[in-house]
Amino acid sequence: MPIKIPKLSLVVLVGPSGSGKSSFARRHFRPTEILSSDTCRGMVSDDENDQAVTKEAFEVLRFIAGKRLALGKLTVVDATNVQPEARKPLVELARQYHCLPVAIVLDLPEKVCQERNRTRPDRDFGPHVIRNQKSQLRRSFRGLRREGFRHVFVLDTPEEVEAATIERVPLWNDRSDEHGPFDLIGDVHGCADELEALLNSLGYEPCAAIPGGPTLDSGLVYAHPEGRKAVFVGDLVDRGPRVLDSVRIVRNMVRHGSAFCVPGNHDMKLVRKLKGKNVQITHGLAETLAEIEAVPEEMRGPLRDELADFLDGLVSHYVLDDGNLVVAHAGMKEEMQGRGSGKVRDFALFGETTGETDEFGLPVRFDWASEYRGRAMVVYGHTPVPEPQWLNRTVNIDTGCVFGGKLTALRYPEKEFVSVPAARTYCEPARPFLPAEAQAPSLTAQQAHDEVLDAEDVLGKRIVPTRLRGKVTIREENAAAALEVMSRFAADPRWLIYLPPTMSPCETSRAEGLLEHPAEAFAYYRSEGVPQVICEEKHMGSRAVVVACRDEEAARERFGVTTGELGVVTTRTGRRFFNDADLERRFLDRVRAALTAADLWGRLDTTWALLDCELMPWSAKAQELLRAQYAAVGAAGSAALPRAVAVLDRAAGRLEGEEQEKARVSGSSYRRREQDVGRFVAAYRQYCWPVESLSGLKLAPFHLLATEGRVHTDRDHLWHMETLAEACRADPDLLLATSYRVVDVTDPASEASGVAWWSELTAGGGEGMVVKPLSFIHRGRRGLSQPAVKCRGREYLRIIYGPDYTDEANLGRLRSRGLGRKRSLAIGEFALGVEGLERFVRHEPLRRVHECVFGVLALESEPVDPRL
């Protein structure tokens, strides 16, 4: 006997002890899908036959079943379930999670059950138990459908049980195998003229004509030559002038396979009327009924039947494209997507209301979209809006065509809107529906929602999926630390779309007197299969992220900022770089002017840009660090060591023999330390100069990371260097083009040239260089390669490791430093940074972008040697 069950359902096995329920379950279902009452008794009491813990066992069973159903997992309950009161909580559980309950009844003869139990030593109860269970089953199983079971299957003999097969079938709303592309079309409401114009705009063409006069089974059949499919969000009927023509167009497309359609509340109200139900003739239903009555009497009956059959046969909502797209008339909560229940259908038709009405007599609706956190994109209609707006991966595309607005389609996966204006206002709305220019808010719905952020979106242990590195784990304690920094010190969160990753140094060098050397960086990338690298001069400044908008309109439209700010300059931890707002404004004006002069707005078709930069001098942001740490060490060493040397020299003059030699050795050691302190002071002083105005600042951009619609990780580093150099030439007083060299790591001569350039930079007091694969992203043998490694000079490292780090004893100890954790963090933060930008350019909610931004900051809390 073939048994077809929904892929997502609660399967309840029903039958007396000995009927073979457990064997049947093991034969047809995965072990993880089966919840046995006996197993649950054993879990709570260590004895599967302990009937005294039945209550506790079923509490465990129902708890686990609820968790599985919430996650969309088919669940099988293996228990006798012969009494209605035992089945009732299971049916309620299925309804709670919008799943279909299925009953599979094993009604085998009592004799068979008794014989089987006699062979089981753990079933030593008397024959009266099975007799009672059979009696209870016989009295109640005819009422299984009335109890709420949508599917009931009865197996009466061992042969039927043995021959049974289970087939899992998708629900009607599960069209995950349909991958599009799609054109999702908003509420039509009888506006057939506009529908035909919109289909033409989308590229649909008549591919057939069905003769048939005024019946529904007639008219043109539209299809797209490239195989696109239309998806209608319902409300085809009422209010407009050509209701029947609208339904004909959609019905023909659905039957031809070039469209899907979900029902709207107006459609279902018409169905009830056509089936003789008593409904109120309001909200445009009178116009639809009048159009039906205008059909010749001999055709009116068949037309009414065709109309009712088509609309009543529509599925409440569709899940498309592997669950990435959900279409419903009034929307669909995450926990209801792909489910089947009366509540799901009601939500799809009407949304969720408070039970109250507004001043226009219309129901007040809960704003489910503002709470939506699902993975799938949800496209819906139902409530007319002047313009479609994204909110938490949902969008309402009912732009009120029948009220004089537009008929709108969303192209998927392109996420492009296509609209045609209404020819006229066919119906005056109960609630005022103004044209977009009179009603459009200063912020989009998503931006208005993003003004209030929820800490729950970034707190706790988080596993963030990224395109580049899969899942990146953020520990709970690190997330809390990141929130503390962000909430107390960060800039306006609407600007915070990116934080730069940490960077690992190259492998430790074995060259005499050196800790880092380019040869190790070149060797690393050569081992990763990178043929060419770019070596960029490493500026000794502070990391700065610059967001620049072309004008106030761009700042409002793209970032939701209406304060007049045209951008921001932030540190690597998301704080404002400048405490002086006027200085920041003038700084950004200069950057914007340079981008304008280089025509980057036009060439990149953008109104904003995000730059990754180094801002100098170092002292501009690290003044307190310099004063408290570096200057203090330099001052103490400069004051104490010359005196110590003088004392030791005088002591050596007074001593003789072995004691004198010891004093001279100590004096030489202190003299070297004195010289090292001098080099230490000279190293940090060259990165410090007074800044009184913009004239004292230098900005060296090295990544043009993102502009409208694009993250530029697909461009190699040469493109970034050359493009940014054009902007730097427009304002050389403020902007500094970063020097670079391209090195072929497979050519010894090219490597030698790169090493020589590094030596030249560091000999002149430079910090060193950053070595990167020429392509922005490279995957090596074991996954993502380091996006960059730094190779710092001998004298600069005195600032990091201390004045006397070059002593051989100290160098020997430092050469054992481990880079594994640092490199892992560098790749994780890099992947998160790119992921956040990609989410931003896809117009995802700010909370989704901040998940990545907070992730970068949280990983910075990991315990790693800060000197690396």
Image (tube, grey):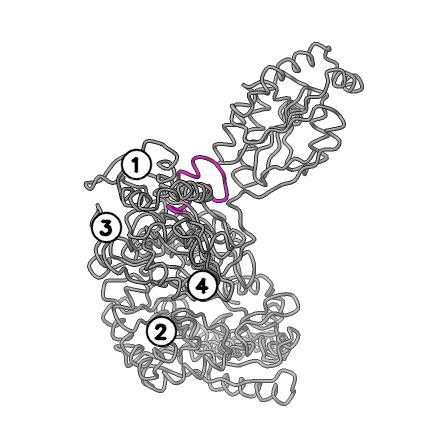
Q: Nearer the viewer, residue 414 or 760?
A: 414
Q: Secondary structure at mark 1?
A: strand
Q: Secondary structure at mark 2?
A: loop
Q: Residue at x 67, y 19 (%)?
A: 16
Q: Are marks 3 and 4 in contact (CB under 8 Å)?
A: no
Which of the 4 image quadrants contains residue 497? bottom left
Q: CA distance from mark 1 to mark 4?
A: 44 Å
Callout in the foreground (3, 2): 3
Mark 3 burial class by Cα count in 10 Å: few <14, some 14-19, many 20+: some
Q: Residue at x 22, y 48 (%)?
A: 429
Q: Which residue is mark 1?
A: 354
**Residue numbers of the magenta segment:** 329-346
Mark 2 burial class by Cα count in 10 Å: few <14, some 14-19, many 20+: some
Q: Which residue is mark 3?
A: 427
Specify the amino acid type for callout 3.
Cys
Q: CA distance from mark 2 to mark 1?
A: 42 Å
Tag of residue 760: none
